[in-house]
Amino acid sequence: MRSPVSGARRQSGRFEVPAPRLAQGISITVISGFGVITMLNVLDAVSNYVGLGICLCLVLSLYALQFMVTSAGARQWSARRRGTALVVQALLTFVPMVWIGVAWGSMAGPLGGSILLLLPARFAWPLYGTVTLTILGWSLSARVPALEVGYFAISTALTGLVIYGLTRLTDLVREVHATRAEMARMAVTQERLRFARDLHDLLGYSLSTITLKTELIHRLVPVNPERAREEVASVLGVSRQALADVRLVASGYRDMSLEAEAASVAEVMAAADVRVEADVDCGRLHPLVDTVLATALREGVTNILRHSKVQSCAITAAVEGETVRLTLVNDGVVPQETPRDGGGGSGSGLGNLCTRLTQIGGTLTAETTRDGRFRLVAEAPVRPVTVDAPDSGGKPSASVA
């Protein structure tokens, strides 16, 4: 079966070479071209086959070392290994010039590039300039024509810069692709977290409702079969909605209404014999704010049903200036109480809500009062903002949605 990655690289019937390989291929081609130019220069200075063979071996040795220096791992070499590589390359560059002459001077360009790649900038650039000036002085001492003097000096400087620039660009391409791969992994992780968060928020309430109504049905069957049948129909409706919610989680979070959720909550609480005072008067809210606050109400009620022996509950929601405030207060708080629906632990509902509210510029406050009541306050701006997650050293940035 063809992998998605290989399929994505095919566009209009053409196979696209991955950028890191392409950049590395260009670097290798350019450096190899400099080697060929060196051999062409040497042809004028060495006429016998033995000398040409020796020159060919020297060129191959030099460029084998050059390819090692321009490899991805060379920047992680130890200082001793870097120094050894530069000393060997310097010897292979300058010693043959005594025999071959200034024609071998074009090998100084790769040496300059290696110096820029392997040494810190405060040492590299002065040494790079020294190599260029050395070739310039050698050319002048050899009494070659002025045009050739300029050629050797300029080609040395440019060759070093080209090798340095291409190698650094190749490293940059690798880093960019590694970063893209990491971002893809992070996106997958974020999607998994979103799926888990949405599944918790959507199904926690539905399953708690099903549990409570099933308990009610169990009590009603012997004494009030008609009412029990009505509650069975209600449970079927909740279970169908839970199934639909699961399907929606895979594609994205569905829109919810705070007012509709408050009405549903009142019905569920009544089934659990809980007195509910609801005052939700927010008018028409931004869909994102409406959904987040409805989710907050749903999670708050889920926590009430699971973690307290609640008898009364008050729900209020109102717009105050540029802020929408949802307040949920209940009694019957019992520390370390086993959840009523049999689930273990407190879960991550409040943490999920805090994340959701933070993403739109809101806040979440949860506290237990002295008289044994639990108070949950969710605040969100009337006009939501999208807040980026802060890094380790900065503040979150926000933009109006």
Image (cartoon, helix red, strand yellow):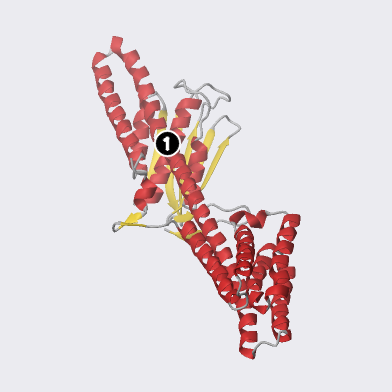
User: Label 1: which residue?
Assistant: 201
Q: Which residue is drawn at 61% across and 72% down?
A: 48
Up the image or down, 308 lies above or below 42; here it is above
Up the image or down, 152 lies above or below 18; here it is below
* Picture quarter with the C terminus: bottom left
Pick whichever, 245 or 17, lies toward us. 17
Pick whichever, 147 or 305, lies toward us. 147
Residue at the top extreme, as displayed: 222
Q: On the image, which quarter does residue 239 sit in?
A: top left
Q: Which residue is drawn at 36% across and 52% down?
A: 8
Q: Confirm whether residue 297 shows in the render.
A: no
Coordinates of residue 121 in the picture (x, y in percent): 70, 68
Q: Which residue is drawn at 56% across and 66% down?
A: 31
Up the image or down, 357 lies above or below 215; here it is below
Coordinates of residue 387 in the picture (x, y in percent): 50, 54
Q: Is mark 1 on a helix, strand or loop?
A: helix
Pick whichever, 240 or 338, lies toward us. 240
Coordinates of residue 273 in the picture (x, y in percent): 39, 23
Q: On the image, which quarter does residue 80 sit in?
A: bottom right
Callout 1 environment at 10 Å: few (<14), some (14 to 19), or many (20+)?
many
Up the image or down, 219 lies above or below 385; here it is above
Residue type at the position of mark 1: Asp
